[in-house]
Each structure stands twice: as C-alpha cells, then as structure tokens.
Amino acid sequence: MIVLPVVALMLLFLALVAGWLLVVWLIVKRPILSLPVAVYVGLTAWVGAHDAQALVIYALTALLVWRLVHRNSFHRLVGRRLRSSWRRLWVYDRRWRATMALSGLGGRYGLRRRVPKIRSVRSAPGLDQVLVSLAVGQSADDVERVAPQLANSFGARGCQVVEERPGRVWLLFATSDRPAEPVPGAPETAPPEEPAVTASLDTNSHGASAR
C-alpha cells in the first residue's frame, strides 16, 4: 500500500522536471518567452506561490472575457501577436532547418550548414507571412523554384514569394481556403497561381516586387 504514494510522488516529480525542461527549451528557442516566466517568478517571490497562481488565473480569465466581449480589439492588440508567436514556434521553427536542407536551400560552407533565417512571422486567419533573410549566394528565384515544396512542408495550400529587397523575401503561405484578413496600409500583392493566396503583404517596404 505504501508503494502507490511513492510511485505517485515519483510521477509528479518527473512531470515537474519535464515541465521545467520544456520551459527551458522554449526560452532557448524563443527568448521572448523568458519575459512571462520572469514575471511569474517575480510575482512568486513578491506575493508567494499561491497568490501568484491566483493572479495568473485572474489575468487569463480577464483575457478570455475580453475575447468574448470584444473580439476585434482583442485580436488587434493581443490575439494576432499570440497567434504569430505560436505559429512561428510550432510550425516554422520546428521544421525550418530540415525543410531548407531537403528543399535545396541549405548548403555547407566550412564546418557549418548555411540556411535562410526567419526574421519574423505574421499570422492571420488564412495567411502566414514569413520574412526570411537569404543565405549568401541565394536569390528570390532560388526560393521561388521550391515554393511548392515549402508549402507542402509547412502544411499550406500554396506559397507566394515576394522580394522585399535583395537578400530578403516574404513567403506568403495560404493556410486555408478562407480569404485572409487585410492588413491596413499594406501594399497589395499579385495573386499567385492556384491555389491562390488572397491577402495583402504586411510590410513597410514600398518597393517590394511580386515574383
């Protein structure tokens, strides 16, 4: 009979260790996530673990009520950033290096493999916009040649390549048949071949050229 509580405590300990390891891994992958962790640790040190947990629950409840009461303002101020961070972490960062290497956009120079780098991800229903810095020796034409492979790798229905400037491109991934929400003030981009990407490019560049 004593064995069951011991096993339960061991499982709880392993779950806590796994949880903290996951938090550390997420912070290493996305340093911005260290901010909420630091806030929670600070709250715990200031008011204690119980009150810190209560404050977190109150904050999450307030966000939920906000989303239910006024969806537009929530999406504009909070939801879009949360969605973009989640899409970058779970969809793009997780598969990026393998996708670049297997699609021919990665090359070895010296002891390191050089691949394009993600600069930012902006996500809206129906469309993900991924800003990418190309590796030395690459051009937008190289990316455009493998656009169908990129769309398949990231679970999108299509991929359009838009050159912002030499060495930097936007990848527009159509994530569903639903038309993407327009971004105020963004220049229009020409629709690609089927499947179409119905969206506006969210960038401050006025000289981007669609390819």
Image: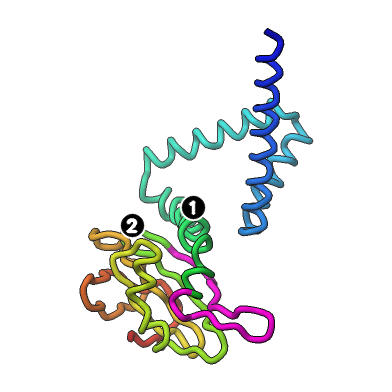
Asked whether 5 falls inside the magenta stretch, the response is: no
Displayed quadrant of residue 40: top right
Residue 78 in view:
yes
Residue 185 in view:
no
**Horizontal relation, residue 114 to residue 154: left or right:** right
Front-lying residue, 192 or 198: 192
Q: Position of residue 178 (x, y in %)?
A: 24, 58
Q: Position of residue 194 (x, y in %)?
A: 21, 73
Q: Which residue is mark 1?
A: 82
Disc 1 secondary structure class = helix
Q: Give amino acid for label 2.
A: Pro
Quadrant placement of the N terminus? top right
Q: Which residue is mark 2?
A: 125
How far apart marks 1 and 2 lie (CA) works out to: 13 Å
Region rendered in magenta: 102-122
Q: Position of residue 139 (x, y in %)?
A: 46, 89
Quadrant placement of the C terminus? bottom left
